[in-house]
Image (cartoon, grey):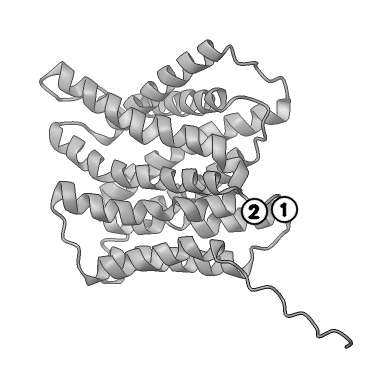
Amino acid sequence: MQKPDPLSCVMMALVGAMWGLHGPAIKLAFAAGFTFPQLVLGEYLVGSLVFGAAVLWQRARIPTDRRFWSILLTAGVIGCGVPLFLFWAYQLGPVPIGATLLFLYVPFTQLINFIVTRKPPSGRELLSAALVIGGAAVAANFLDAANAANLRGAPFAVLAALCFASFFVLTSRLGWDATPALRSLVCCVVSGVMMLIIAAGAGWSLVPNVPVFATAFFWILGLGVFGQVIPVFLMVHFGPRTGSALGSILTSTELPVAVLTANLLLGDKIGPAQITGVVLVLAGIALPHLRRSPPPTAPVGM
């Protein structure tokens, strides 16, 4: 694979930043009367409508390659597991525990890539993953919160991380056999249908308890655009250019942005632990892009 271009790296970092904004916004939506399944399904619906309109406007060609469709449909099914397992993790334990364990998607991505390609990650990639996970653990005070009662949701958070890593690997292997809008549409539709089936089977209410319809509409529209449409489009468009291993590290910008946004919107305090965690994550993101020193050249005549 060729070295990723700077624009692709910036766009993947932007994906993480938008997810960092998305987390505090979700908490505000909970306070407004929404539930987690309602928000997830609403975001998939917005994504399906926007990407569907883009596909119709572009008159996108429908690929016929079976391999492409098998990968894309599998990615849509697995992608639904990320919010679903996180929902259960947050229901059974503290949010910092689930949010920290979700960052296991970085080494999981490297592991899946190794299994698929038989090519081990570089030392820099391994160190970057360690810095990202360590930073997330420090920022969330993971060790202080990790007791038996708080770890009941941990297995679901690990499953969410595994689904996230699998989604990264699958979407990065799609190639260029379809427009980003078409690929994004399929992912949103498949994940939305899966979520709708699960919600119906579990008996979850999908009607928000929000008194004003306009308020509910703008909440769903805003979260759908900034939490689903833009990030998914950027991921399926630029993910194949960066590769899943580097892409997973770049999207770790989610943590620094989430810490800052939570402070501004929710009044969460930023202490030494959060600052240290953010610095570690940023170091992990920057490490793969540091210029390697050229090997020393032998003197002439030797």
Residue 273 in the image: above or below residue 166 = below
Q: Which residue is mark 1?
A: 117
Instruction: Give residue 299's quadrant in the image.
Output: bottom right
Most distant residue in the bottom direction: 302
177, 151: nearer the viewer: 177
Q: Are marks 2 and 1 in contact (CB under 8 Å)?
A: yes
Most distant residue in the right direction: 301
Q: How many marks?
A: 2
Q: Which residue is mark 2?
A: 113
38, 17: nearer the viewer: 17
Q: Quadrant of the C terminus?
A: bottom right
Q: Residue at x 30, y 31 (%)?
A: 223
Specify whether 91 is left or right of 120.
left
Specify whether 60 is left or right of 224.
right
Which SS class for mark 1? helix
Instruction: Give residue 260's quadrant in the image.
Output: bottom left
Residue 21 in the image: above or below residue 126 = above
Q: Amino acid at mark 1?
A: Thr
